[in-house]
Structures are given as structure tokens and as C-alpha cells.
Amino acid sequence: METDKSGLRKKIGLLGGTLDPIHYGHLRVSEEVYEVLGLDEVWFLPAYQPPHKLSRNLTPFIQRIEMVKLAIKDSKYFKVKDLEAKRNGISYSVDLLKQLHTIYGNQYLFYFILGADAAIDIESWKEWQTLPFLATLVIVKRPPVSMEEISKKFTAIFPDAFITRRPMAIEKQPAIIMLDTTALDISSTNIRKLIKQNRSIRFLLPEDVRNYIMKNGLYMEQYTGKVCRANANNDLPIEGIEAARCIYKEIQDNKGERIVVLDMRSISPIADFFIIAQGRSTRHVQGMASRMKKDLSRKKIKCRSIEGEEEGKWVLMDFDDVVVHLFYEPVRAFYDLEGLWSEAPRLVMTLEGLRPEERYEK
């Protein structure tokens, strides 16, 4: 049995998730948990394929492992483990914790770190009732879910667990610790969005990780065709501007507001058209994205990927030649994509379809 200098079992923090890519939010919360709980190490365990992200193509596991190695290379107490690769399937937290106990037995005390935004939905997890018995759960601050919400919910669903908001290491399970860590407003989803928009990600993650992403062209999706098959007749290809018209109409039908169409054909290699619109609430944005994906699919306009749907603040939908940005109104004003791409010609909807704005100005 491995012990620390006092002869006690070593205390190991566990941070899972896709880490696609790892960023300063992951690193800072791990540092704070390590410090306040007096841990011996924190292990980073990238998930092979999380059950809640089956619809998104993840960066290959080996590349996510390499990014973690680069991010933690200067830390003596941060370690990366590739246990998920050996299971090569859907990654469930309970299976991972059981695997750790099988490998290490009682050698270590495990502290499983998860954000409040993930913890609030713990009842949807596989065998969720067993988790506090396999490792002490460490819930860290992660907006928009408050620690008060977590405290109330976990007290109700884990009545036999020892629950505390004091920064103290606990050796007996079931136990749950809630920590008010620094909540950096950084997410892997937004980093991927910024890369897709050719915007800077500097200072959101370690420089070595940023260089690795740029060198390997990660998150820069390649578009293989300039044709969008939007017609019910599968043999009749339709140009991207017609797909943009169909998507514009779909946003209108779902009560999307302030729709802006930008012609990016001479500006960006990412897509021919960007469409920006907003909803009145995050729920409106989520519903709009869900219905658009379903209804446009019936018209042979396929959504290749969708990001941000869980939060509903900024949903990015990739339709090959057309990229759609659906915002919750206050978030749109903050990012001001129209200002960022002010040089892009705007298109307006007419009886003839989408046409250059200047031709229809009064």
C-alpha cells in the first residue's frame, strides 16, 4: 500500500471529462482542490467517449492525452492516466471508479472532482447512487448552477452521505465536499468555437497546448464540398446560398430574431455563409436549435455538428457551407460577431431569395 510521509494512504484527486481541449479552467480548479484538501496528486483521466457527447466527434483520444501531458509537464503532482483507452467504449464514471479500485485496491483514497453544472444532473448518470461510496465527491463551483442548489439537491438524494462545505479531506465514504473554487469563465466548447472562427485562443490554455492545436490543425474542420443538397430530390444538388435561404426561413419559423446573413465566400475558408440570430431565452435558443436540426434534416440539409446546445447561450450549428450562430440576446451583444466580421457583405431576404443588401437599400 502506497502511503505519504505520515504513513497514511495517499490522497488522489481525479479529474475526468473529455478535456477537448484541456484549458486553464481545468488546471486552476485542480490546483485549488489539490491545495485545500492537501492531496498528494491529481490524476487527469480523459474520457474515451462520454455518454452525453455521442453526437459530437471528439478529437482522437491519443491527441487529447498529448495535450494534457503538455499542459501539466511542469507540475510534479499532476499526472495523466490513459485508463479509458484500455476500455475503448462509452465512458461511465462509475465504471472508471470501479476500475481504479480493481487496479489499486485500498492503496489510495480517491477524490472525484466534478463541476456543479455536471453534478446537478447526476441522477441521469449510470449507477449514480454508488458514486459517493467509490470516491469522495468534490463538487466545485461552475456557473450557472449555484452551490446552494447543489447542497439542497445532494442532501435530498444522498441522505446517508457526510456533506460539508468545509475544505477538509475525508477518509470515509459516502462523503461529498463542496468547494467554492475560482470559477474561470473558460470552456472547451468556446475554445473550439473561437478556433473555427479564426480567432485567438491565447491565454485561455497553456501555450504548449495552443501550439499543439495549431500544428495539428485541431478543431479546424475541413469542408469537402460546395454543394448543399437541400431539395427533396436527392439527385438535384442545390448551391449553398439556397441552403442558407432554407435555414433563414427555418429560423424565422421558429421565431428567431434579428437574423443577419453574412457572405463569407471571399473572407473565410470555413464556410460560404454565416447566419446569426437570437432567441429570447436560453430555452428558446435550445428549442430553436433542436427543431431546426430535425426539420432541416427532412429537407436533406444535414447538421454535421452542433455545439453549445446544453447551455443555450451560444449554439453553433455546422451545415457545411452554412454556419449558424444562435445566441441568447445578452450573449450576442457581448461577442458582437457582426462587428468582428464587419467587412463581410450582408444579404437580405427578398421575394427572389437572399440578395446583396446594398441592392435593396432605400
Image: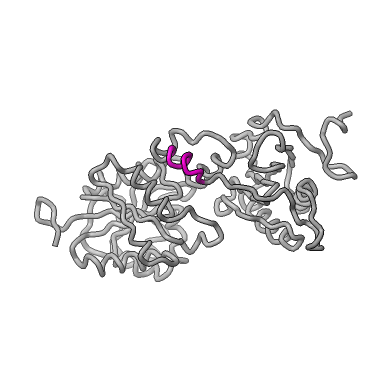
- Indicate the position of residue 181 as horizontal and vertical percent values: 35, 44
Q: Residue at x 22, y 59 (%)?
A: 109
- Indicate the position of residue 250 as horizontal and vertical percent values: 76, 53
Residue 89 seen: yes
Q: Residue at x 22, y 65 (%)?
A: 104
Query: In the rendered image of this protein, does residue 62 appear above or below residue 36?
Result: below
Query: In the rendered image of this protein, does residue 243 appear above or below residue 87?
Result: above
Q: Which of 196 and 148 is in front in this view?
A: 196
Is 339 on the left-hand or right-hand side of 79?
right
- Indicate the position of residue 223 as horizontal and vertical percent values: 64, 48
Name the quadrant of the C terminus. top right
Q: Is residue 333 magenta?
A: no
Coloring scheme used: one colour
Stretch in magenta = 210-218
Number of labels in the image equals: 0
Name the quadrant of the N terminus. bottom left
Provide the major secondary structure of the magenta segment.
Answer: helix
Query: In the rendered image of this protein, does residue 337 appear above or below residue 79?
Result: above
The quadrant holding residue 261 is: top right
Is 224 on the left-hand or right-hand side of 109?
right
Q: Which residue is drawn at 52% across and 44% down?
A: 192
- Indicate the position of residue 338 as horizontal and vertical percent values: 67, 33
The quadrant holding residue 203 is: top left
Residue 148 seen: no
Is 284 on the left-hand or right-hand side of 53?
right
